[in-house]
Amino acid sequence: MNIQVPPSAIEGHLRLKSASRCGDGEGSVQVQIDPQVKIGTAKVFSVYGKGGIGKSTTSSNLSVAFSKLGKRVLQIGCDPKHDSTFTLTKRLVPTVIDVLESVNFHAEELRPEDFVFEGYNGVMCLEAGGPPAGTGCGGYVVGQTVKLLKEHHLLEDTDVVIFDVLGDVVCGGFAAPLQHSDRALIVAANDFDSIFAMNRIVAAIEAKSKNYGVRLGGVIANRSTDTDQIDKYNASAGLNRIAHFPDLDVIRKSRLKKSTLFEMDETPELRAVTDEYMRLATELWEGKIVPTPGRSLKDREIFDLLGFD
């Protein structure tokens, strides 16, 4: 079903301009969010990575770790699958686009409980969703989501905001969360395809960092026993590995059980993982993880670097 968004709903919140005119980074076309719509005082992290690499698992458990530090956390899923907060809320919650459509895009008719839901350990959860395939732009969805949160004063008492972002698409729309973020975190496995996708994300962050405050926080190695390929890429691209989560069966099972790792029956190997999440959250909150400028590599460089002929 195609959602017909009236022009009045878009006007003032989304403009598509030539990059050479709007100065919003490099590329032929970029999405420019209304500069008046800002998150506020919360620390904002955007989590990117190749599809299926475990961004939602990483984001949700990082959200819980922040909440266990006593922080008020809001997680925003930015994937049309709208399953980022699944393990936190134990269900697929309605998306911002769903609820806007239900009131014919009259946002003033919405209540906070229509689109923000409380998850495990008090983490507040929101799924931005996305436009139907081929009919719209993810940047509009992100812009409308932040606008709704501001209008309902839901960001004023928030300490940490985590954007969990679709990572295989690095167009201006899906790069829009970077315009609100302090740090971008990239989730990658120790394989070529994951690192290739990470390199594209690094390029998007490079472009946004020229005009916005976002900086590369570092790389989270996930679903990997070893990290040698990630470390080799990081050395060439000027990135840091800030956490490592191994390929454990209990991590896969947690999603099947609709649970975060902090809710699973504790074992020594699981305790090591949750301790790593707590360490990461603590160091991010305290500013101990130094951002890096980083640089994206040319495609040929990656093939040569990782041993392909």
Image: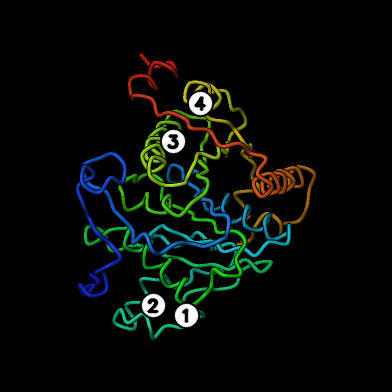
Residue 101 image offset from top left, x and y in percent: 32, 77
Residue at 48% x, 77% y: name it: 152
Q: Along the polypeptide, which appears first: circle 4 or circle 3?
A: 3
The answer to the question of whether label 4 and label 3 lie on touching residues, with beta carbons closer than 8 A, is no
**Is residue 276 depicted above or below 234 in this figure?**
below
Q: Can see residue 181?
A: yes
Sort mark 2 into few (<14), some (14-19) or many (20+) by Cα contacts within 10 Å. Answer: some
Quadrant of the image containing the N terminus: bottom left
Q: Amino acid at mark 1?
A: Asp
Find out whether the residues at labels 3 and 2 contact each other: C-beta distance under 8 Å. no
Residue 243, x across and y down, in percent: 63, 38
Query: Mark 4 = which residue?
Result: 238
Drawn side of residue 222 relative to residue 272, left or right = left
Q: Residues within 10 Å of mark 1 (few under 14, many from 20)?
A: some
Q: Is residue 200 left or right of residue 85?
A: left
Mark 2 vs 1: CB contact within 8 A: yes
Q: What separation in Å lies between label 1 and label 4 (alpha carbons)?
A: 43 Å
Residue 198's label in the rendered image is 3
The residue wearing badge 1 is 114
Q: Identify the amino acid type marked 2.
A: Val
- Looking at marks 1 and 4 on the same chain, the residue that comes earlier in the sequence is marked by 1
Q: CA distance from mark 3 to mark 2?
A: 32 Å
Amino acid, disc 4: Gly
Residue matched to label 2: 99
Q: Neighbour class for label 4 at 10 Å: few (<14), some, many (≥20)?
A: few
Closest to the camera, between mark 1 and mark 4, is 4
Q: Secondary structure at mark 1?
A: helix
Q: Quadrant of the C terminus?
A: top left
The residue lying at 31 percent from left, 62 percent from top is 140
Q: Are marks 4 and 2 in contact (CB under 8 Å)?
A: no
Amino acid bearing label 3: Met
